[in-house]
Amino acid sequence: MEAESVESASIFHFPVNRKENDMAKPVRAKFPTSLGVFSPTGHVVMAFGDDNSAEMAQRALLAGGFAPDEVTRYNKEDVVLECEKSMEHASSPAQIGQDVAKIEEYLALAKKGCGFLVVHAPEEERTKQAIALVQPYGLKFAEKYNRLTLEELA
């Protein structure tokens, strides 16, 4: 039996299963979702001054003990594209629960050139560790999506 991994089909859409032998094909990483809506519960969304800073922060997280599947980097173009797509469908019933103001905020940051990381850090200690590791790389914005709240970290 082949192992399966779960990856999102689009930043704001449902996850799809991929077979292990398909993993060699490049696939752009996607934002976590719940019921088709951006909802990265247990994740910290971070923005940096530019894509290069986000890449350096990603390296620091990996060197600091985070696994590759816990740290995902998004360049500004990907964030702009997906946020604009999401905004086009903001009035759709499928987008109920989507925080339009938050998507607008991410879009504005991406248009200013910010690079993004989404870090899986459900435990408070992992969250603190992640923030401490990335601070030297010009962290502009960080929020943790808890089960029922959004916690501003930086």
Image (tube, grey):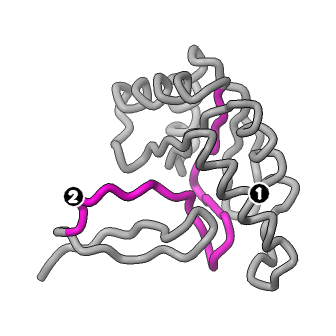
Quick check: 78 left or right of 58? right
Looking at the picture, which amino acid does disc 2 mark? Ala
Instruction: Locate the N terminus by quadrant.
Output: bottom left
| Position of residue 2 in the picture relative to residue 32 (left or right) | left
Stretch in magenta: 22-48
For label 1, the SS is loop
Hey, which residue is sitting farthest left in the picture?
A: 1
- Going 69% across and 36% down the picture, which residue do you hit? 142
Label 1 – label 2 distance at C-alpha = 36 Å
Q: Nearer the viewer, mark 1 or mark 2?
A: 2
Identify which residue, 82 or 15, lies in the foreground.
Answer: 82
Relative to 22, does residue 149 appear above or below in the rendering? above
Q: Closer to the N terminus: mark 1 or mark 2? A: 2
Q: Residues within 10 Å of mark 1 (few under 14, many from 20)?
A: few
Residue 151 position, x and y percent, is 75, 45
Q: What amino acid is found at the position of numbered circle 1 in the picture?
A: Thr
Which residue in the protein does label 1 denote? 149
Residue at mark 2: 24
Q: State yes or no: residue 64 in magenta.
A: no
